[in-house]
Amino acid sequence: MRLVTFTTTGGPGKRLGAFTENDTVIVDFGAAAQHIAPDEDQRIYASMLDLIDGGPTALARAGALLAKVISQGAEEALIERDQVRLEAPLPNPRRLRDCTCFLQHLRNAREVRYTRLAAREDDPDAALKRFRAAGAMDVPKEWEAVPVYLNSNHLNIIGPEDNAIWPNRARRMDYELEWAMVTGKAGTDIPAEEAADHFFGFTIFNDISARDIQAREIRTGAGMGGPGKDFDAGNIMGPCIVTADEIANPYNLDMVARINGEEWSRGNSSMMDHSFEVVLAHLSRSQTIYPGEIFGSGTVPSGCGLEHNRYLSDGDRIELEIEGIGSLSNRIVKPDGWLDRDTPDRN
């Protein structure tokens, strides 16, 4: 199934549904259950998290309900996609962690950074050779051994067509072409060969980053996150969660990013150095993984402006497309009252 969370004008709030008719129509699970199976427990249709918490039985019930709506043509449960507002498919995950599964992205980013630093010296070519000889472009062996991760803001996730908000004092804003895995059941010390049983589904993930702020934070030794990534409306997901059984091979999905219709990035999920199975095996050591957690893949090689030394402008439209999942489109905007980096704080 291709599961969505949506709202309608004047409606009762966020509702759970599924795409049909090539993603042009949404089946409203709540309305469908009231029409087709009014005597069944309908709490699993209250939200995406309720459905996930219901486990395989709940997912099977939702699949059967979807099939009945399609076969019976139950108009009471069908809504045209252009009549709803799609929300982040899982607006309230229990946790959000972003992992470094594509190591070539890191190599590309280091190449750009040190090329830029070398350009400031009298002999840029010699400086770049010196950086290479010192191993500045190399990915640390520790990152090759295990998937390093950062904790991301799971309290203010936005969805399709929402505006990504340009944070105060940021100059170089960037998108990140990623995908994410949603967990479907709990586990501790999960073996990699059993980890796929914990996958609920997959979605597109855009980890908006303020690169100039991030660069300053990295120099403190605090890691990749901090204010350069941890701000409201900076984590974007959608348009749907595709259940794991719908994708035969998740590690062969084409991934494309377009800015204002122009292709900037292209990659494939096969380029991952650490699979989601490895991620769960590593992160579940002496730690319980719960249903409804989200794990980002990190950026696919070439999948951000940083790797091209090219950044976003106010009002740019970002479109991320991943084979089998769909397309996620948003604008990045400076809000009213946006503060320039050199403007003093407001009291």
Image: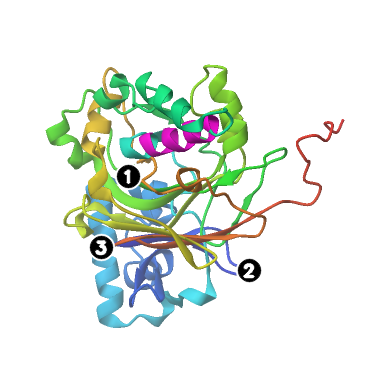
Q: In the rendered image, which residue does mark 2 sit on?
A: 10
Q: Is residue 18 above or below residue 122?
A: below
| Marks 1 and 3, how far apart at CA | 20 Å
Q: Which residues are magenta?
A: 107-118
User: Which quadrant of the structure image shows residue 109?
Assistant: top left
Q: In the rendered image, which residue does mark 3 sit on?
A: 63
Q: Nearer the viewer, mark 1 or mark 3?
A: 1
The x, y position of residue 111, in whole percent, is 42, 35
Q: Residue at x 49, y 22 (%)?
A: 223
The amino acid type found where label 1 is placed reads Met
> Which residue is most to the right?
347
Q: Residue at x 31, y 75 (%)?
A: 69
What element does badge 3 sit on? helix
Q: On residue 68, which mark appears? A: none
Quadrant containing the C terminus in the rendered view: top right
Earlier sequence position, callout 1 versus callout 3? 3
73 and 193: which one is in front?
193
Q: Is residue 11 above or below residue 248?
A: below
